[in-house]
Amino acid sequence: MQLGRLPRIKLTSLPTPLEEAPSLSAYLGGPRILFKRDDITGLAFGGNKARKAEYLMGEAVDRGCDVVITVGAVQSNHARAIAAAARRLGLDAIVVLSGEEPPERQGNLLLDMILGADVRIINTDDNYVLMGVVEDIARDLRRQGRTPYVIPLGGSTPLGAAAFANAGLELLEQLNGRGIRADAIVHASGSGGTQAGLYTAMKVTQSGIRVQGISVGPTREVVTGRVRGLAEELVKLLRLDWRPHPDDIVVTDEYVGERYAAPTPACLDAIRLVARTEGILLDPVYTGKAMAGLIDMVRRGQFGPDQTVVFWHTGGQPALFAYAGWLAEG
Ligand SMILES: *Cc1c(COP(=O)(O)O)cnc(C)c1O
């Protein structure tokens, strides 16, 4: 894969560790579980968005942009990562967040404020409305002689997905170096860039590792469509002689619960279990739901004791503090 010619600015400390989780495995009586610790990618509390930010900000700087604008939910990890990346590179950041103004600015929203991002909270849950607001802001900025760089939801552009193709190669190197054969990667999936990159890397290298996305909000069809579209564009960007096949993009929406960002009881249980067996913190919006999915799949016998699963820890822990009321007891 020709990742070397893409724009990129170093903002992270890679590779992230690949750690065994023996107590969690033993507790579940299930597969060997390894955590890919992307919660410690290194940029302002880490997470998967830091990887994408390296490529997206690389392009922003190449284009001579002086301000970045992005969107997300009020507890967006992506917005926080972009705000941090922008400040590190001397750029301004405007983050347009969907939802209601919370009673207290906590978690990622607090971090956006500390990072000095221009935070605009818009009461809508429609991404098209949000992107419309962003386009208006960008037009005004251009009129003022500024050069904005607009990043869509979750940083999930082909370039953002390329960061995760690279992350996939990073994992394969770690597995090969340690002589481990993994059967599957399990991770939280939303805007699709993470899965598109990992899926493409696992397929193109013929690794035989299945990538299991666990939706944190949208239906299976929506997430699969996003992953497929991004994988198709990624293939062009990397000039790969391979085509994604919709049938082998694996997504489940069984663990969403009521809606995006509303923790399920299984999600809260999974956060406590992983904290108490491994001392690793998950988050209430993404990785808690993904782990609830993995636990359920193990209980249903979909991953047996002779198998090896990599749980991709995509980060998100700052949101824990915005969900204190859900987690302080129990
Ligand atoms: C954004 C995010 C995801 C999902 O990644 P996508 O590329 O948007 O699918 C998973 N986990 C965390 C913590 C995130 O912030």
Image (tube, rainbow, N blue to C red):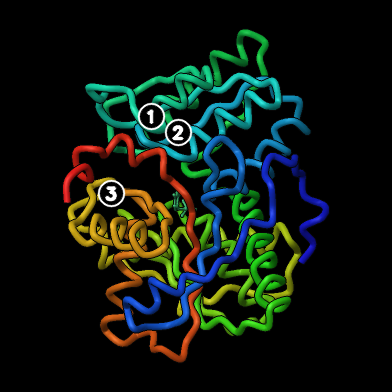
Locate residue 278 relative to residue 174 in the image: left or right: left
Q: Nearer the viewer, mark 2 or mark 3?
A: 3
Residue bearing mark 3 = 260
Residue bearing mark 2 = 71
Residue drawn at (69%, 39%), measured in percent from left and top? 11
Residue 27 percent across, percent down from the top left:
32, 76
Residue that sits furthest to the right in the current view = 5
Q: CA distance from mark 2 to mark 1?
A: 6 Å
Name the amino acid type tagged 1. Answer: Leu
Name the amino acid type tagged 2. Answer: Val
Residue drawn at (62%, 16%), measured in percent from left and top? 142
Residue drawn at (31%, 68%), measured in percent from left and top? 293
Residue 97 percent across, percent down from the top left:
38, 29
Q: CA distance from mark 3 to mark 1?
A: 14 Å
Q: CA distance from mark 2 to mark 3?
A: 16 Å
Q: Is residue 181 visible?
A: yes
- Label 3's element? loop
Residue bearing mark 1 = 97
Determine whether label 2 and label 1 are within 8 Å by CB. yes
- Residue closest to the eye, 164 or 293: 293
Name the amino acid type tagged 3. Answer: Tyr
- Dot label at residue 10: none
Whether the residue carrying mark 3 lies under 8 Å from ligand 1 is answered with no
Residue 226 percent across, percent down from the top left:
46, 58
- Label 1's element? strand
- Label 2's element? strand
Counting residues from the start of the chain, the first of labels 2 and 3 encountered is: 2
